[in-house]
Amino acid sequence: MVNRGFRRRRGRVCAGLLAVGLLFGAVSSAQAGPRESADATIVDSTGRAGRTAALTFDDGPDPRNTARMLDVLDEHHVEAVFCLWGEHVRQHPELVRRIVAEGHTLCNHTMRHENMSTWSPAAIRQNLRATNAAIHEAAPGAEVRYFRAPNGAWGETPRVAAELGMQPLGWRLSVGDWNRPGADVLVRRLREGIAPGGVVLLHDGGGDRGQTVEAVSRFVPWAREAGWEFTLPARG
Ligand SMILES: [Zn+2]
């Protein structure tokens, strides 16, 4: 895909800029830096009208299902967002590299899925930086464009994430895939719940997400047929 080639080249440019930045001590704490300046708005849409939606996958990378999900997305040429735990990144850095190499976008989901709703900005900053450091150790130069608070317990996190160059990322549709109601139920909830511009919350990690993989493999071709386009979350 043209897009992917562009992203790969861009990754190398980022890495080059990062090296220059380090030389002059000018690099930001977000390291690779945001594509556009982030603010504290919790983005839950594609920022576009019409039949567009964004697929986002939380709690990985996970050796059981992340690679299978990547296969499904590749088969259907869908670019998605992966919200990673720093601890899981350290355990499975090769999966992070594959996510980046296949043109997907990264999101910081804290080190260990901590509830930060009552944390001080300084404590939040430390955790988010550690998570990004783990990601950059696995995939040097990779851009971490978004931050999502575990369980939507935002507290002071949106402001801190924005300071670190990451856009807070919410969602409009959640289908309860962590409860494993069966792929048929998940497909039905996705079909009935998808709405123009909506960010969709799904999971590739945090448990066995085989049902989610199957549901996405059935939902995406149906959605395409119905005229839906998959894109990234953005401020409107
Ligand atoms: Zn989560």
Image (spheres, rainbow, N blue to C red):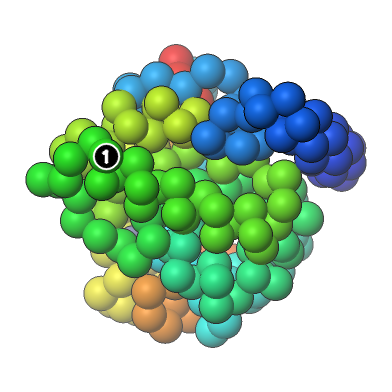
Residue 38: give x, y in percent of width and height. Answer: 47, 22
Q: Residue at x 20, y 50 (%)?
A: 116
Residue 18: give x, y in percent of width and height. Answer: 74, 35
Is 147 in front, or is 222? Answer: 147
Say whether residue 62 is visible: yes
Figure check: 139 above or below 65: above
Tally the numbered discs.
Answer: 1
Figure check: 192 above or below 64: above
Q: Is residue 102 left or right of residue 227?
A: right
Quadrant hosting ligand 1: bottom left
Local secondary structure at mark 1: helix
Q: Residue at x 41, y 42 (%)?
A: 147
Q: Is residue 5 left or right of residue 38?
A: right
Residue topped by disc 1: 122
- Residue 39 position by quadrant: top left
Figure check: 125 above or below 221: above
Residue 207: give x, y in percent of width and height. Answer: 38, 80
Is 40 in front, or is 1? Answer: 40
Say whether residue 14 is visible: no
Q: Is residue 191 left or right of residue 73?
A: left
